[in-house]
Image (cartoon, grey):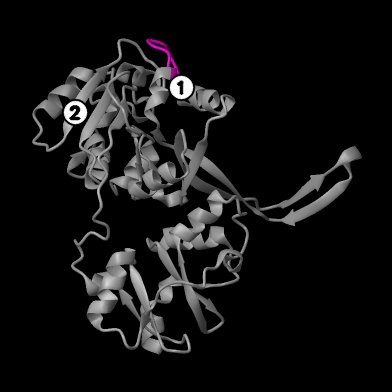
Amino acid sequence: MKEVLAKISNRIISIEETLINAMKKMDKEGVKMLLVFENERFLGILTVGDIQRAIIKNIDMNATIFSIFDKNKVYAKTSDSVEVIRKKMYDMRAELMPLVDENGELLDVYLWNEMFDSNKEKRVDKIDVPVVIMAGGLGTRLKPITNIIPKPLIPINDKTILETIIDQFEHIGCARYYISVNYKSEIIEYYFANLDKKYNITFLKEDKPLGTIGSVSLLKGKIDKPFFVSNCDIIVDQDYRDVYDYHRNNKNDITIVTAIKSFHIPYGVIETGENGLMKGISEKPDLSYMINTGVYILEPQLIDEIPENTFYHITDLIEKVRKNGGRVGCFPVSEKSWTDIGDWNEYLKTIKL
């Protein structure tokens, strides 16, 4: 048992820990699943999906894991062959699988990289929906490099920012891309015209800046299914098929991918009521907020709601949909799953300089 605990030491969390701390631990360890214990007793597993569903249900991030804990997970049994265990892991896309005896005692933990080739994809279903990438900005935050190179072509390792974003969508089956361009557009178009690629790109040329969604009006009559919209300076470590499933299952008009951003207040926070009377005090609380990452899914009919040749922000469209009684959903990801590479500090962290 000591050997097993040593192997999973970085994945162990107490049932009494908060959801926000569980998400922070996943970020720190770069994992999507944790093993939940009560003292030395194994209770089960917690997935990032469990936390995401809790957030969608508006459960407080300072609630404990106990408040959302699902005891009905699938585990490996002592009677299971290695092939059966491997199939369970693959079918569930599980990065780990606990082996338990008839009393629920933990005997071992199988890890994905032990059971499969490290390059084997956990999920094989694909979605082929259009992707619109907003790449027309000036890249002001990355000056002076953007005085010479347009932000979408700034390198991340051996590829550009724009290729890195496209690769993530291509991985899940997306093959049609509409790229909105303005600043140094001829350089961007030339680069992709000479790039060996398997996907199709159509460039949407803005004659003037049209805001964060205005150029999508150029797609009227060209898209007839839900489509992704992404800024060209962010990377989100999330399988976008999960976002698409959430969008369709909840019949949303717009889905916003949000990041959970937490702030630690190093003071006692006081809540007051009428006449300044204290209602309560929280000692050094952690406050959590949902941040807009800049990735969305839109229903195709919303294209007609965007005014033509007009500076128009995504927030304008969101408010219009809400005012008309439409559904705007939020799909949460962890804080470190979202990287804003349009900022110098985050860009330098990304390329590990």
Can you tell which quarter of the image residue 174 is in?
top left
Real-space Cα separation, disc 2 to disc 1, in angstroms: 23 Å
Secondary structure, mark 2, is strand
Q: Which numbered circle lies on residue 313? A: 1
Residues tagged 2 and 1 counted as in contact (Cβ below 8 A): no
Quick one: quadrant of the N terminus?
bottom left
> Looking at the picture, how far across and down is residue 63, in whole percent?
63, 60
Q: In this rendering, does residue 337 appear at all?
A: yes
Which amino acid, by three-letter code, is at mark 2? Ile
Q: Main secondary structure of the magenta part?
A: loop
Above or below, 322 relative to 85: above
- Judging by the rendered image, the residue that carries numbered circle 2 is 201
Q: Is 260 positioned to the left or the right of 32 in the image? A: right
Which amino acid, by three-letter code, is at mark 1? His
Q: Which residues are magenta?
A: 305-313
> Looking at the picture, how far across and down is residue 193, in whole percent?
11, 26
